[in-house]
Image (cartoon, coloured by chain):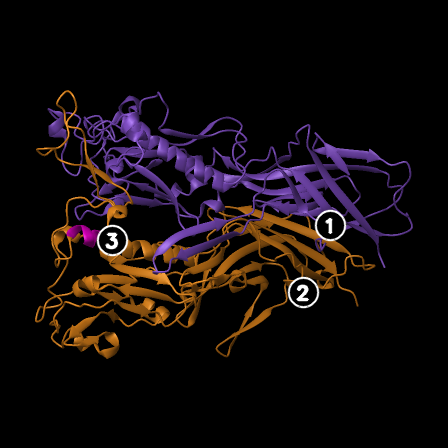
Chain colours: A orange, B purple
């Protein structure tokens, strides 16, 4: 800690700002600081407008597959050619910067799938009409029929049908994604969905969510089966479908782990070429020495909160999730000048090279990538104070 | 110190302020600044961010007359005006309103003859140009679009503007839009809104592949005339910006006060260039987005909301109640009577020559009727 008005506590500051790059490389005209061993360096401020994406996932997280009738070969059963738009049945996330952003993408994917299904009808795998526009209201002009209204000149008065999801009785939601109040999430399979489809979960997504590889619902007599009862209730060893496909119950699958688990970010690191004393970190018992100017644990900036609503009629089932998203300019030091303090080793400071790295935790190992600052800005203030003995 | 109408303030005290036998540190313990002339985008003239062009199939994209929209009324262009927006949400709302205006304007025009739009330009008749998924749309009247409860209230839904929960702009285009129109961005507009990586020669377009997938680009051929190609889009396309709009649309970076006080020269490295720094305090336009998502009683997604800090009007960047941690060392307190301070604002301005943002500092414009105020605290060393 530095005391501002301590006698002899000589203080010098260095401000570094950079736009469009994660590295700032400068050789100063003369030495900024000599005999650096007499100083400590504090990062009093670190401002950036960039938040790294939550993870590096690029797999198909959820793939919706058609369910066949008993004895039908699973491998031979595909969506008809008109369903060839991959994004209608396979969910691959686009880069997301917040958990609610990912939640919204999932919600939209399942809603759109339900909308397409509703437009086809629930008959197993019928043909898709030529155009499927997933918007709330989509007026499509009706073909003129005998008895339709005409104007004074005998011309047909245009009539429209709403082909958007807003006009459907359940808004086309045959499978529903939602966040639960405890931070986990759920997928509600309607009977209509379960009768026609099942879901294959991506390998990494299985580990993150705790969902099984295949999510399905089948029924035999009075018994209802899901993946917990064994995959052989869906298809046998020869990949032939078991059990009648039709199901008459809605089933909700809840994730085992919190939705928060999709956030793999660990830290934002600032590395400098100053004569810094090293920082020791230990990962799974293995020692590592790094020359870090500062390390900001990104978990510190997360806020994922929930709300419980009560009224005269009892506790509401409404779920309201709050999250802070660091997308504007933000000071990662949060006004604490002591967030990063490093002793300097003997030397001079004339070369000022700083580089930003983001660390992700990926399946038991730590990945280090250069922070993408191609569209970003960052600025830091370094305070060099004389050591007091 | 309080100053109206000027970014510079100075005074000459009758007596020296400090004891010249002591050493001092000082800090700015209060700073209040009028942001009436500090909009999020520092443009000085009306500046176009994007415009809609006709996807005039079979003709050259290089000839302006073959792609431009009717000039009157100018509903196809989106421009920002000087001193127009003080928050990103206001910009997003205005883009959403522009989209509503576009829907009305394009619906008044209709798509009764597809030949100057997405249909083959040399088709022998209007019917011959209507090859699926293209669709003739009858021109609507103002009365039809104004009729409450009408299916075509507000016009055909060509375009809708959305914001994702992580604040990325999303342009939702009906297939009738992408098959007949494209959006041309200025380089500045694309960088500001987050579309730079999605464009093909500054144009946002989508084309359907053989499987029906909407692929970005593909609106012009690679021939000499850059002939416009058919759209073949069969569903709506959501053009999602590659980064949150809050990262780029608010170009304000910081407010800084500089002085002539005898302080240790500090150093500043801006975009790898060394300069001497005379700043005694700086405050950034920090903004944290609070987003919330609501699932109703039945578990269905209902809405998402966003909350940010609004930097507008008289704004207290440093409050007296704050914990002050930034102290400057005064080199000498000898006969310190004359004080002069300047207030600056730093923007990320668009460099048209390099097609990238760069940092630019300028004196903050203080309106005649507004003031900026600052309090300095000096403490002696112990």
Q: Is residue A372 visible?
A: yes
Q: Chain of mark 1?
A: B
A228 or B153: nearer the viewer = B153
Chain of the residue under label 2: A
Dividing the image into 4 quarters, which one contains the C terminus of chain A?
A: bottom right
Query: Label 3 to label 1, Cα distance in Å?
Result: 55 Å
Label drawn at residue B320: 1
Could you tell whether A61 is left or right of B318 in the image?
left
Quadrant location of the N terminus of chain A in the rendered image: bottom right
Q: Position of residue B197 (x, y in %)?
A: 37, 44
Q: x and y percent of residue B119 in the render? A: 18, 30
Q: Nearer the viewer, residue A152 or B125?
A: A152
> Which residue shows up at 21% across the image and 28% down it?
B138
Give the magenta part as a residue range.
Answer: A113-120
Q: Residues within 10 Å of mark 1 (few under 14, many from 20)?
A: few
Toward which corner of the image does residue A140 lie, by quadrant? top left
Q: Nearer the viewer, mark 2 or mark 1?
A: 1
Q: Position of residue B19 (x, y in %)?
A: 91, 48
Chain designation of label 3: A
Q: Nearer the viewer, residue B224 or B348?
A: B348
Q: CA distance from mark 3 to mark 2?
A: 65 Å
Taking A24 as reference, is A192 left or right? left
Which residue is tagged 3?
Answer: A172
Image check: A155 left or right of B350?
left
């Amino acid at each position: 800690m530095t005391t501002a008005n301590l006698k002899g506590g000589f203080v010098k500051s260095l401000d570094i700002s950079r736009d469009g790059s994660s590295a700032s490389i400068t050789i100063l005209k003369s030495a900024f600081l000599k005999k650096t061993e007499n100083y400590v360096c504090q990062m009093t401020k670190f401002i950036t407008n960039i938040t790294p994406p939550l993870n590096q996932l690029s797999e198909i997280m959820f793939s919706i597959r058609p369910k066949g009738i008993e004895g039908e070969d699973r491998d031979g059963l595909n969506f008809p050619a008109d369903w060839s738009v991959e994004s209608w049945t396979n969910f691959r996330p686009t880069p997301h910067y917040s958990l609610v952003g990912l939640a919204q993408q999932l919600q939209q994917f399942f809603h759109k799938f339900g909308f397409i299904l509703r437009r086809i009808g629930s008959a197993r795998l019928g043909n898709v009409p030529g155009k499927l526009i997933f918007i709330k209201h989509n007026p499509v002009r009706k073909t003129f029929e005998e008895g339709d209204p005409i104007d004074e000149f005998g011309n047909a008065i245009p009539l429209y049908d709403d082909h958007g999801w807003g006009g459907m009785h359940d808004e086309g939601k045959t499978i529903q994604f939602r966040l639960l109040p405890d931070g986990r999430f759920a997928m509600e399979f309607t009977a209509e969905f379960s009768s026609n489809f099942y879901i294959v979960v991506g390998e990494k997504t299985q580990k993150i969510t705790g969902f099984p590889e295949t999510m399905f619902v089948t029924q035999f007599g009075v018994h209802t089966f899901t993946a917990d009862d064994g995959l052989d209730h869906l298809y046998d060893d020869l990949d032939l479908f078991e059990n009648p496909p039709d199901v008459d119950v809605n089933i909700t699958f809840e994730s085992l782990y919190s939705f928060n688990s999709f956030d793999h970010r660990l830290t934002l690191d600032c590395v400098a070429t100053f004569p810094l004393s090293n920082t020791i970190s230990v990962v799974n018992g293995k020692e590592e020495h790094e020359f870090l100017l500062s390390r900001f644990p990104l978990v510190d900036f997360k806020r994922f909160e929930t709300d419980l609503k009560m009224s005269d009629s009892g506790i509401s089932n409404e779920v309201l999730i709050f999250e802070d998203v660091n997308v504007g300019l933000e000071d990662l030091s949060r006004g604490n000048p002591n967030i990063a303090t490093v002793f300097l080793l003997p030397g001079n400071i004339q070369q000022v090279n700083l580089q930003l790295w983001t660390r992700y935790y990926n399946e038991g190992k730590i990945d280090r990538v250069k922070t993408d600052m191609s569209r970003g800005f960052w600025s830091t203030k370094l305070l060099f104070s004389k050591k007091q003995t | 110190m309080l100053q109206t109408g000027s970014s510079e303030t100075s005074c000459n005290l009758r007596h020296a302020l400090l004891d010249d036998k002591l050493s001092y540190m000082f800090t700015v313990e209060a700073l209040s600044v009028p942001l009436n002339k500090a909009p999020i985008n520092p443009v000085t003239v009306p500046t176009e961010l994007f415009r809609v062009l006709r996807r005039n199939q079979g003709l050259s994209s290089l000839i302006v007359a073959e792609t431009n929209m009717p000039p009157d009324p100018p509903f196809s262009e989106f421009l920002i005006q000087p001193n127009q927006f003080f928050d990103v949400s206001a910009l997003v709302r205005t883009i959403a309103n522009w989209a509503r205006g576009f829907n009305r304007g394009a619906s008044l025009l209709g798509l009764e003859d597809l030949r100057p739009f997405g249909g083959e330009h040399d088709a022998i008749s209007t019917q011959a140009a209507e090859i699926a998924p293209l669709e003739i749309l009858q021109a609507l009247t103002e009365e039809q679009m104004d009729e409450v409860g009408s299916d075509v209230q507000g016009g055909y839904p060509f375009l809708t503007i959305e914001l994702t929960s992580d604040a990325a702009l999303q342009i939702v285009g009906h297939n009738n839009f992408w098959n007949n129109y494209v959006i041309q961005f200025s380089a500045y507009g694309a960088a500001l809104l987050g579309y730079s990586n999605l464009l093909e020669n500054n144009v946002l377009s989508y084309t359907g592949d053989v499987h029906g997938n909407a692929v970005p680009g593909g609106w012009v051929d690679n021939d000499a005339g850059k002939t416009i190609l058919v759209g073949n889009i069969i569903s709506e396309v959501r053009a999602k910006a590659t980064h949150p709009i809050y990262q780029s649309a608010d170009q304000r970076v910081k407010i800084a006060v500089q002085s002539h006080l005898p302080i240790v020269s500090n150093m500043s490295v801006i975009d790898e260039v060394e300069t001497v720094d005379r700043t005694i305090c700086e405050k950034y336009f920090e903004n944290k987005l609070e987003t919330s998502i609501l699932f109703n009683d039945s578990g269905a997604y209902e809405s998402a909301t966003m909350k940010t800090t609004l930097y507008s009007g008289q704004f207290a960047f440093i409050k007296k109640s704050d914990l002050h941690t930034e102290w400057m060392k005064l080199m000498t307190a000898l006969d310190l009577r004359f004080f002069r301070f300047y207030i600056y604002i730093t923007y990320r301005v668009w460099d048209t020559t390099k097609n990238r943002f760069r940092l630019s500092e300028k004196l903050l414009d203080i309106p005649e009727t507004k003031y900026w105020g600052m309090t300095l605290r000096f403490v002696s060393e112990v």
